[in-house]
Every structure is written in structure tokens, then in C-alpha cells.
Image (cartoon, rainbow, N blue to C red):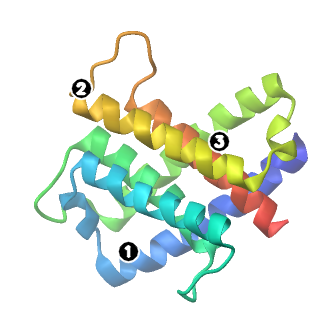
Amino acid sequence: MDKTSRQYDHVISVCQDIFTKKMMDYGISWRILRPSSMTDQIYIKAQRIRSIEQKKISKIDEGVRSEYIGIVNYCIMALIQLEKGISENDDLTQEETMSLYQRHFREAKDLMMAKNHDYDEAWRNMRMSSYTDLILMKLNRTKQIEDNLGKTIASEGIEANYLDMINYAVFALIKIEF
């Protein structure tokens, strides 16, 4: 599990580096997006990964790695949106944004480590396509919960689905990186 923790931290640094650079380019313009729009953006990325997996070819010179990074970063942005609400302007400093980003990533890692202990690193024996399918399933669940105005009867909420999607994408990135 120590190896998994180190690999997870490496993926965090890769995702955070991209997030930081894009924040320098665009600011926090994503703060205007409603959580449902975030969910749809994540869906687009997961669907592209699935399409590439099935067709075995990509016509855009950008592989699945960047899409998994995008899934991680959009899930964290969505968690921030759920926590802070949408904003019509740049209401967070870069420092506040990075603090929230890192807190949500730590929360995802803590969840992964607990589940990883119980499941004994079963994710390492899964196929890449399963991560994609699980992310798409979590997206469908999230859309249903959003359509139900966030109400659930016996299920985990939207936040739990975003955290799971982060972890499935991190698993894929670990397999790609290592």
C-alpha cells in the first residue's frame, strides 16, 4: 500500500500541475458553471476515452491520459462548486482555490486508502476499460441524483460519486504512468 500511496501522490502532482497552469491561463472562470454542467463536462471526457478504447484510434492528437487528468480536475472543481456554490465572478484567490483543490484531493486519497485496504488493491487487476465504464456509471448515477435535486433514499450523494470518479481516474493514470 505504500507503493500505491507514492504513485497516487505522483498522479496528484501531475494533475495539480495541469490545474495550476490552466488556472494561470484562464483564472477560475469555471466558477460560473453549475454542478450539472461539470458533470456533463466529465461525461464528455469519459465518453471520449470509451470511444477511443472501442475504436482503437484517435483523430485528435491528444490521448486518454489528458482526458483522465481532465476527469480528476473537473471532479475536484465540481466538489468545490458543491461546497461554495456557483459564482458569477472570480470570488476565490488562487491560494484559496489551491487550498480547496488540495483538500478535496486528500479527501479522495483518504477514501481510496481505506477502500484499498478492504479490497486488497483489487483495482490493480482490473482492465483500463473497467475504469472508464465505472466512471460512466458514476456519471449516470450523478445525473440521476442531480435530476432528483440532490435527494437520495438509500444511496450515497453526489460528492461520493465525484470522489469515486477521481479515484478510478487516478487508478487509470497510475497504470498509464507506471
In the rendered view of the protein, which quadrant contains the C terminus? Answer: bottom right
| Residue 178, numbered circle | none
At x 42% / y 55%, what residue is drawn? 43
Q: Nearer the viewer, residue 77 or 6?
A: 77
Position of residue 30 measured from the top left corner of the image (x, y, whole percent): 27, 64
Question: Which residue is labeled 3 in the image?
Answer: 109
Q: How far is mark 3 from mark 1, CA to CA? A: 22 Å
In this rendering, position of residue 19 left or right of residue 116: left
Secondary structure of residue under mark 3: helix
Question: Which residue is labeled 2 in the image?
Answer: 148
- The answer to whether residue 106 is seen in the rendering is no
At x 79% / y 68%, what residue is drawn? 177
- The answer to whether residue 38 is seen in the rendering is yes
Residue type at tag 2: Asn
Graded by Cα atoms within 10 Å as few (under 14), some (14 to 19) or many (20 or more), the crowding at tag 2 reads few
In this rendering, is residue 13 above or below 56? above
Secondary structure of residue under mark 1: helix
Position of residue 164 measured from the top left corner of the image (x, y, whole percent): 57, 38
Question: Which residue is labeled 1 in the image?
Answer: 23
Q: Nearer the viewer, residue 47 or 177?
A: 47
* In the image, farthest residue toward the left: 88
* In the image, farthest residue toward the top: 154
Camera-near label (2 vs 3) is 2
In this rendering, is residue 76 above or below 159? below
Residue type at tag 3: Lys
Graded by Cα atoms within 10 Å as few (under 14), some (14 to 19) or many (20 or more), the crowding at tag 3 reads many
Q: How far is mark 1 from mark 2, CA to CA? A: 32 Å
Camera-near label (1 vs 2) is 2
Residue type at tag 1: Met
